[in-house]
Image (cartoon, helix red, strand yellow):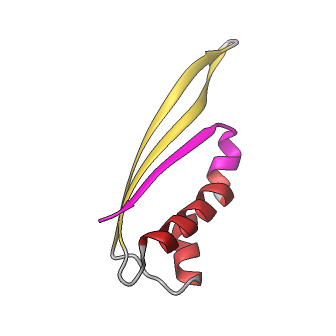
Amino acid sequence: MALSLILEQAGFKAEEMNTKAEITLEKQGDGFAITKSHLTLRAKIPGIDAAKFKELTGMAEKGCPVSKVLKAEIALDAALV
């Protein structure tokens, strides 16, 4: 969601964005916690080049409110298709 907003503000609209999330769930005390999340994003965005895509996905990765709530290590593998 963060990336969609950032793309729109930069003048781009994605035709397609597919994201897969793999999480690491670890026992902590009496419960469990999500400690890592690896996101794989494949996007089709007309008119954007690889450098601008990397810049904007980096902004989304750093500013994502969900990432802040999880307090987990987040890794993003983003590519244009």
- Quadrant for the C terminus in the image: bottom left
- Which residue, as the protein is rendered here, is positioned at the far top? 30
**25 or 9, nearer to the observer:** 9
Please tell me whether residue 65 belongs to the stretch shown in magenta.
Answer: no
Query: How far across and down, in percent of the image, does residue 32 sit?
Result: 61, 21
- Location of residue 33 (image quadrant): top right
Q: Is residue 75 left or right of residue 22?
A: right
Please state if 66 lies on the left or on the right of 39 as rendered: right
Q: Which residues are magenta?
A: 67-81
Q: Nearer the viewer, residue 77 or 5?
A: 77
Looking at the picture, does residue 4 appear above or below residue 22?
below
Q: Is residue 13 above or below residue 75?
A: below
**Residue placed at 61% from the left, 30% from the top?**
35
- In percent of width and height, residue 13 lies at 43, 81
Which residue is rendered at x = 35% and y = 82% of the image? 46
In this view, 59 is above or below 22: below
Q: Is residue 80 magenta?
A: yes
Is 50 situated above or below 37?
Answer: below
- Farthest-out residue, left: 81
Left or right of 60 in this view: 13: left
Image location of residue 28, percent across then percent down: 67, 16
Could you tell me which residue is drawn at 39 percent across and 76 percent down? 14
**Residue at 51 percent of width and 65 percent of height:** 54
**Looking at the image, which residue sits at the far front?**
51
Tally the marks: 0
